[in-house]
Image (tube, coloured by chain):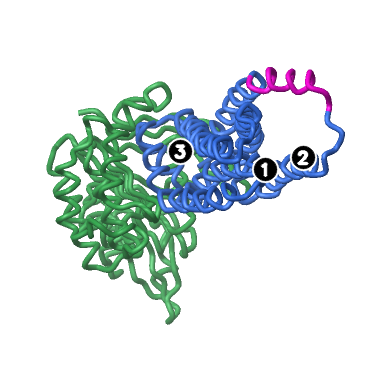
Chain colours: A blue, B green
Amino acid sequence: MSGILYKDLMNLRRYLRQLVLVFVVLLAIFSFSDSNYSFIAAYSIMLSMMTVISSLAYDEQAHWDKYAMTMPLSRKMLVGSKYLLGLLVALAGSVIALISVVVGAVFAKQDILEGLSVVASCLCVALLMLSILLPFIYKLGVEKARMMMLAVFLIPTLFILAASRLGLQMPGDSFWFGVIIALPIVTVAGYLASFWVSVRIFSKKEL
Amino acid sequence: MKNAIEVQHLNKQFPGFALQDISFTVPGGSIMGFVGENGAGKTTTIKALLGLIQPDSGETTLLGLPLAGNEKEVKSQIGVVFDESYFHDNLTLGIIDTMMAHIFGTLWDKAEFAALCTRFALPAKKTIKTFSRGMKMKLSIAAALAHHPKLLILDEATSGLDPIVRDEILDVFYEFIQDEEHSILFSSHITSDLEKIADYVTFIHKGRIVFSRNKDVLIDEYGIARCTAAQFDAVQSGDYLRRRTTGLGGKELLVKDRAAFHALYPDIVLDGASIEDIMLFYVKGELA
């Protein structure tokens, strides 16, 4: 497992470097303005999710799965490595987002608690999106799952952005409190269930 | 000594194509050439052997073990080379080395991998993207050998390479087989490569095994009878396998037993048949 994860990270090393660079630039811009940093939190976590999709696209292009299955690796391990990669990059994205929250709190006197809950929610939403996406990718391939990907990424993002920008009538504090409690539980359950489904799909796949 | 590969009554149905009742055995310590035209079912059979596809029925063993339940044990003792390199474009030899060491654990021999890469003159610092086709194939072979497998499965590993590179690669396989415990299943449509190194030949055509035999016996026994139209009329249809019509109206017949055919028809000219001849008769010739 560690071997495949290492391969994914090394294969994506240029891409990851670019992501970090983009983030640094964004952080610099946002740090000197009063803009809402939740954008940067969402952005960095979502971009890190794209990393998993890219790694799957690379694998598909190289027929990696077919080759990997000639080595002492199980199909469960191959799928597991992607879920682990997803978790790792999402956490890395969260760390970056946390930096922006801290920067925002220190320099722009923004509310750190609100910032933390934004980062945590973004992390959960990102993992939930991945939970929906990955089984589709294993079933249809990256190319065919692309439309699905657009839907999964765009609809909630647009919804959240629209809601926050337009200042729509938000439900009360108790509702959000409930969401914050429930979200991590739903995320963990969803991620595990998605892993199980993906393993089932991938086990039957002809490589 | 146990068999390196056993395939028994393997069946797999696809839309428009089927593997039908595939059975053959690769004895331990031997090189089995697996021949057939493109699309005959060579790759599909190999995929079934490796568990990449699920056969509808039939049984296979690798190194004496069925794959189910022994996947890790079996796969750590085999090396597989496909017709292309499946390493990602952005990787380098060093990254591949580290990755494989993680995957194969103590079985991975870093010194062996480095020695093979040096022997094949593979550039250490460059990414795979910049490798030529020959270099990629050499890399795949180095990667397949560096964990000291007992069985090599090669699927068109020399196809699309120039004769010099093919010769270099065949040398490596030849060295590999010097160890009596080592075996190779070598699928190819380049029959001259197989004639050089194979001990046995299995011929697959339209998803069925036509024969699986000792190569020397095959080349000693099979023959091509070249007869005129008049001579052909005298030949019983049971005495040959396939026929082809030549440009001048004569017939060429593929016969299974040269000596027996000569005893029956001493006037007809008989030549030896190469694996390529035999393939051509089956693919393009007519039934007796």
Q: Are marks 1 and 2 on the same chain?
A: yes
- Amino acid type of the residue tagged 2 in the rendering: Ser
Residue receiving disc 1? A36
Mark 1 or mark 2, whichever is nearer to me:
1
Q: Residue at x 22, y 32 (%)?
A: B107
Mark drawn on residue B48? 3
Q: Is residue B209 above or below residue B160?
A: above
**Residue nearer the viewer, B30 or A26:** A26
**Residue nearer the viewer, A10 or A202:** A10
Mark drawn on residue B259? none
**Chain ID of residue with mark 3:** B
- Amino acid type of the residue tagged 1 in the rendering: Asn
Mark 3 or mark 2, whichever is nearer to me:
2
Give the quadrant of residue B237. Answer: bottom left
Q: Secondary structure at mark 2?
A: helix
Mark drawn on residue A164? 2
**Chain ID of residue with mark 2:** A
Res. B205 in view = no
Q: CA distance from mark 1 to mark 2?
A: 10 Å
CB contact under 8 Å: marks 1 and 2: yes
- Amino acid type of the residue tagged 3 in the rendering: Ala
Q: Is residue A171 above or below residue B287?
A: above
Q: Is residue A117 left or right of residue A203?
A: right
Q: Which residues are magenta?
A: A171-184
